Amino acid sequence: MQDTSPSSVSAQASMFDQVVRFSRVLHNGGISVNSSNLIDLCNSFKHIDISRREDFYAATRTNLISNVRDIESFDQYFAQYWDRIFAFEDSELSEIEADGDEDSEETGSDSVFAEADAGDSQPATDESRPDAYSAEEILMKRDLGTMSEKDIEQARKLIAPLVALFAEHQSRRFQKDKRGRLLDFRRMLRSNAMQGKDGVTLAYRKKRIKKTRLMLLCDVSGSMQTYSRFIIQFIYALNRELKNFEVAVFSTRMTPITEYLKHRSVEESLDLVADYVHDWAGGTTIGNCIKEFNDKYARDMLRSKTTVIVLSDGWDRGDSSLLSSEMKRLSRRSHKLIWLNPLLGNSMYKPLCQGIKTALPFMDYFLPAHSLESLAELARTLKEIQS
Amino acid sequence: MFKSIDDVEKQLAKHDYISDRMLATSIYLAVKMQKPLLLEGEPGVGKTEVAKVIATLLNTELIRLQCYEGLDTQTALYEWNYPRQMLELRLQEARGEDKKAIGANIFSEDFLLKRPLLCAIQSQSATPPVLLIDEIDRSDEEFEAFLLEVLSDFQITIPELGTIKAKQPPIVILTSNRTRDLHEALKRRCLFHWIDYPSLERETRIVTTRVPGIQTELAQQLCQFMQLVRELELQKLPGVAETLDWAEALLALNTSELDAETVEITKGCILKYKADADKLKGNEIAELIKQASAAIQGNTASHSDVLRREWND
């Protein structure tokens, strides 16, 4: 975009160059455009009158945009970019400063990160926060931070049926199965044709069982510290039960930790994770973390049938509109989105804080997770929902 | 086929489909560039209708493939007619044909059950058929990947018969309700258009065209009311299909003007969830009707203002 000087925007610059430049503007604005679509767009200029703004706009949009979420920002970039160029061709006096807007946007996003970094370096200010709510918050039956080995064993027993609920679901596709209940005519006729007999050997089929994948996003910020030991045990137990299972923890940034949980004892894994995760008990910017997950990891870690569990109290210091838009993205990518909230165990608790409130519409389930009892309840609830 | 974008708009209108310029451009380009057109939008905004209308106005065949989870190639593409093959073998045996000749013909087109995709590709008509792949978001990823292959080359290989290539690629319309995101690769191959809820003016035009006999005043009031309903926080916002249903219902009841009572008893046409119906009751309805009338009067007032000004000039 540096070379958007008036001379380069002259009439001689080919349309294709302009389109490529425009695609870069879109790209910088977070709308990715495929190069084959650019070529198609140029081809479609043959069919329309590009001097008509609305037709030119329609052709550009229909070729380059494939998501309704992008339309609004596309409209802005389109107006910014093309209206200036068209205006320039009309009157040579107008100055083109397309860079201006972009710069301001970049500094805008920089400041968001600066804020996050500041939160990282000053966890002290953050920890004062949950204390302010402690009076209404702490009504726990048991301090989960002081769980004994026996309790952990019990937790694992409770977790097993819960995991089993998640682990499998019935596919609508069929597979052959000798003990199936449905006759598979297709295979029957095929195999019997070879022997010259009709329908002697019966072939059966049944519906395939697909394994569900689980993705756990776990809040380990300061306000969650009371629960963090329990949480890591919970994660560890889940990990032993489940194969297709990924874990990431976050407070100010997202860190995948699945590979560190492969060790034999909880303590060993815990030490490793503690070494590896630097923002443990830091501030919380859930929106930024979920965004980081969506941008960086979701593509690799999520499949169409992945259930995503977010474990967090929802105290968010970041931008709540960012959180809501990122939760929306996440919910679209996942099969089911479950939010486990330790604070929900408190009967006084209502999801009033902004973080949770904005994220609520995008969750499939919003459930408590503060004690062993609540875990058992979670398993029951899920059974009810599924049956 | 189509001469220009204006032509598309005009022909659609002639067949009672009121489009906007953006949609007309997308359709025009899809036909000219032989690219599939992906239509997304909330339920009931007329996505499927687009394909139907194009087929009617081009006077060509509409081939429809309704997607669902578990849809496989045997239902979408082709399948061999196994019982008929078996029967043919028996008949040949009974006729005492030469052993070598028996079964030689059973993998020919006579024994092929053609499903929508194969029909679309094999079509011999002068104008290409319209292939409607409806609610693609309901199918699973495996099918999407397979569709990608078909849509890129418009050819199908049947091992026993060989490769079948389309004489001319069909006009492909895909629709999606966005219950999930489609794969990027599929989107990349398509032109994309988002069908939004229509503007007040367009919706009024749609109602007066599709529900002949309705009074203009009622249509206006009705559409204004719908615009206000869509601003409410409902589980499911009513689409154009609902507006049309409602207009027909009101026409059947000989209504000439909206009043709270009529809306109350006919609101089932537009609100399909109990929670939504509970939200819109007596007082709220009266309030909305009042707002709608005010808005209409505002519109006509400003309109006459313009006229007066023009007159003075």
Image (cartoon, coloured by chain):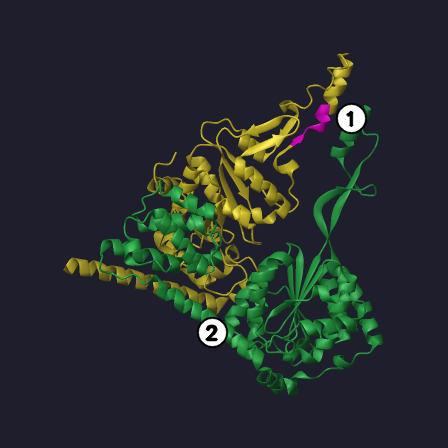
- Which quadrant holds residue B223? bottom left
Which residue is at the front of the view, B101 or B272? B101
Secondary element under disc 2, as helix, strand or loop, is helix
Chain whose colour in the figure is green: A
**Mark 2 is on which residue type?**
Ser
- Please check the rendered image and state whether residue B3 is part of the magenta-colored stretch, yes or no: no
Q: Position of residue B216 (x, y in %)?
A: 35, 52
| Residue A193 badge | 1
**Residue at x-position 49% and y-position 67%:** B282
Residue B240 appears in the figure = yes
Question: In the picture provided, is A234 more to the left or to the right than A338?
Answer: right
| Subunit under mark 2 | A
Q: Position of residue A223 (x, y in %)?
A: 64, 80
Image quarter in which the C terminus of chain B is found:
bottom left
Which residue is at the front of the view, A278 or A60? A278
**Mark 1 is on which residue type?**
Ala
- Residue A128 vertical position relative to residue A164 in the rendered view, above or below: below
Badge 1 or badge 2: first in the primary sequence = 2
- Which quadrant holds residue A85? bottom left
| Residue A180 badge | none
Label 1 Cα crowd, 10 Å radius (few <14 / some 14-19 / many 20+): some
Secondary element under disc 1, as helix, strand or loop, is helix
| Subunit under mark 1 | A
Residue stretch in magenta: B79-85
Which numbered disc, 1 or 2, marks the residue closer to the eye? 2
Residue that numbered label 2 is attached to = A111
Rendered colour, chain B? yellow
Q: Position of residue A301 (x, y in %)?
A: 64, 58
**Residue at x-position 61% and y-position 31%:** B157
- Residue B189 vertical position relative to residue A164 in the rendered view, above or below: above
**Residue at x-position 52% and y-position 72%:** A320
Which residue is at the front of the view, B253 or B310? B310
